[in-house]
């Protein structure tokens, strides 16, 4: 099993450009999450999907959209990138909402200039 | 907003010593988890302790939970250079979403 995979690993965008970060898991997990990690801030939840077909906002959703394409895939879209979105983005999954260990992808390092 | 706050922010010890890291939180929880993050990698789950448990062991890891003080500690015994990483506590509450602390950077000198 590959676990949680993310693409791309690195990306540089200009302000105003758009892009989609892809995440897939092969563990048949129900819940998936997108976090951003900034120095000194820990991980902050952007959006999550408790199950296929549902998505909810997390702590810092502004400037992002998500799609739970199917049970395996959960994508994060930046419609108009801003320098404040420079961060490392992690996707995670778990069998159920909270309470159980989350499995993390390797991360996408995004720089917006 | 951060639920868990780890302490200290950074810790440097000699190989073979024990490392103790603390986490405090603000609201009631169902359980508390500890994760490790090696440089440039994603987080890896280490151990989970439920709100009705006081202590749990896993290999060289020992975690305690004091719900009256809203605090937890992670002890790594006989540390190794490979334990060098950042460590995060994570709590889940009534909303069932995990909230992570800012992390502790542990350096183990060979």
Image (cartoon, coloured by chain):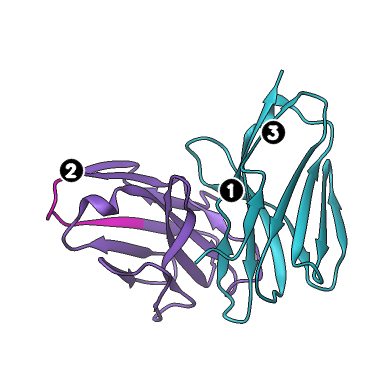
On residue B83, the disc is: 3
Residue B12 figure quarter: top right
Q: Residue at x 71, y 75 (%)?
A: B30
Q: Chain B is shown in which shade?
A: cyan
In this image, B93 relative to B59: left or right? left
On residue A113, the disc is: 2
Residue B70 in magenta stretch: no
**Which residues make up the magenta segment?**
A14-22
Residue A72: x, y in percent? 43, 65
Q: Chain of mark 3?
A: B
**Marks 2 and 3, how far apart in space?**
35 Å
Q: Chain A is shown in which shade?
A: purple
- For the C terminus of chain A, the image quarter is top left
Query: SS class of the residue under badge 2?
Result: loop
Q: Residue at x 84, y 37 (%)?
A: B77
- Nearest to N terminus: mark 1 or mark 3: 3
Query: SS class of the residue under badge 3?
Result: helix
Residue B22: x, y in percent? 73, 51
On residue B103, the disc is: 1
Dot 2, crowdedness within 10 Å: few (<14), some or many (≥20)? some
In this image, A44 relative to B21: left or right? left
Residue B73: x, y in percent? 78, 53
Mark 2 vs mark 3: in front: 2
């Amino acid at each position: 099993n590959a676990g949680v995979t993310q693409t791309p690993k690195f990306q540089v965008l200009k302000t105003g450009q758009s892009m989609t970060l892809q995440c897939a898991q092969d563990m048949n997990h129900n819940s998936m999450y997108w976090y951003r990690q900034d120095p000194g801030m820990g991980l902050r939840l952007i959006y999550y999907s408790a199950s296929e077909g549902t998505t909810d906002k997390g702590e810092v959703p502004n400037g992002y959209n998500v799609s739970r394409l199917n049970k395996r895939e959960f994508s994060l879209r930046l419609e108009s990138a801003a320098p404040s979105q420079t961060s490392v983005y992690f996707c995670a999954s778990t069998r159920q909402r909270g309470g159980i260990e989350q499995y993390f992808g390797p991360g996408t390092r995004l720089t917006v200039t | 907003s951060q639920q868990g706050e780890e302490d200290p922010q950074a810790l440097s010890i000699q190989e073979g010593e024990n490392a103790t890291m603390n986490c405090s939180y603000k609201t009631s929880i169902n359980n508390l988890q500890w994760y490790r993050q090696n440089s440039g990698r994603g987080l890896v789950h280490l151990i989970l302790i439920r709100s009705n448990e006081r202590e749990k062991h896993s290999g060289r890891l020992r975690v305690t939970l004091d719900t009256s003080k809203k605090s937890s500690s992670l002890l790594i015994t006989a540390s190794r250079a490979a334990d060098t990483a950042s460590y995060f506590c994570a709590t889940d509450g009534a909303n069932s979403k995990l909230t992570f602390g800012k992390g502790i950077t542990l350096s183990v000198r060979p």
